[in-house]
Amino acid sequence: MKDRFNLYRFASPATFYPFAGTLIPYFVAVSVVFGLAGLWLGMLVAPTDFQQGEGYRIIFIHVPASWMSMFIYLVMAGWAAIGLAFNTRLSGMMAQALAPTGALMAFLSLLTGALWGKPMWGAWWVWDARLTSELILLFLYIGYMALTAAIDDPRRADKAGGLLLLVGVVNIPIIYFSVKWWNTLHQGSSVNLAKSSMATTMLWGMLLMAMCFWMYSIAVALMRVRTIMLERERHTDWVKAELLGKAGEEK
Amino acid sequence: MIHWNSFSDFIAMGGYGFYVWGSFGATVLIMAIEPIAVARNRKSTIARLKRQLRAETRNTAE
């Protein structure tokens, strides 16, 4: 019963707002530590790839960005499902806060993929199943942001956007399994729970970079959700108190 | 421990310098710009909400 009570307490923006504010510096610090460790391993220690030479080092950002682009979408769809089922205020704000970061991750995935594809395949872009479905993911993010921005009432915007997110979630397994289902130019996954095809330093470099991207995404989404909370809850007493008091001195 | 023999080797990335540093450069740029944009948006939102709040309290006081 106590856990239940706590969960509801943090689902209230008035409690979540200061809590998120306390957490942000920690996520930033952890992200920087993981990033420095990952860059050190990946860029300075890891050996040359026997097939791809030094060009393979792009994967230290390409893979984390791609993972995050899919993971953030799943988290948004999860919030959308909670929001549609229980009509909670927080869920729509969370989905809103995550969308731009997810879109940037999808963009980075495509951009670094193109920068890898040019020297390795001889083409910036091919209409391969993996690449095309990732491009659709970017369009889903942009579509979600455009749709919710076009509806004035935030609760209705959340509902419409949530439906879009839930329908679009079908694209995530398509991206993930595309390299197995179709004959793609894109290589299969290098990381596998049973057996990895990568050198240990390469693998750890990539996992550390993935942690860095993950913590970065949480930090920046928490920053964004705090602003959304002030905006949406502006008629409540706690926001008024926040605006007249603490937020005034904050930069 | 360190894989590279010289700093110029590191920069050249075995001939893949443009692609590798292009990728890392774009990522660093995005990860710097995004938080700055979020912080600026927060600042302007707080300023606007405070203005609105002050206007409202003035109206109710009159």
Image: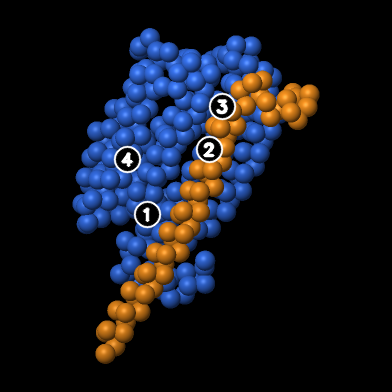
- Structural distance between the alpha carbons of marks 3 and 1: 44 Å
The spot of residue A216 in percent (x, y) is: 53, 44
As drawn, the residue found furthest toward the bottom would be B62
Q: Are marks 2 and 3 on the same chain?
A: yes
The chain in blue? A
Q: Residue at x 27, y 36 (%)?
A: A166
Q: Amino acid at mark 2?
A: Ala
Identify which amino acid the numbered label 3 is placed on: Tyr
Q: Which chain does the orange colour mark?
A: B
How busy is the neighbourhood of tag 1: few (under 14 within 10 Å), some, or many (20 plus)?
Answer: some
Q: Give residue A142's mark.
A: 4
Cβ–Cβ under 8 Å for marks 4 and 2: no
Side of A26 where A172 appears, left or right: left
Instruction: Give how far apart the Cα atoms at labels 4 and 1 are.
Output: 27 Å
Residue on which disc 2 sits: B26
- CA distance for labels 1 and 2: 36 Å
Residue type at mark 4: give it.
Ile
- What chain letter is assigned to the residue under label 4? A
Mark 4 vs mark 3, foreground winner is 3
Say if mark 1 contacts mark 2, CB within 8 Å.
Answer: no
> Which residue is identified by label 1?
A11
Q: Residue at x 31, y 84 (%)?
A: B58
- The answer for how far apart the CA atoms under marks 4 and 3 are is 26 Å
Q: Earlier in the sequence, mark 4 or mark 1?
A: 1
**Residue named by callout 3:** B19
For this rendering, which residue is in front, B42 or A191?
A: B42
- The answer to whether any part of residue A152 appears in the image is yes
Query: The residue tagged with tag 2: helix, strand or loop?
Result: helix
Please say if the residues under marks 4 and 1 sit with CB atoms less than 8 Å apart: no
Q: Quadrant of residue A85?
A: top left
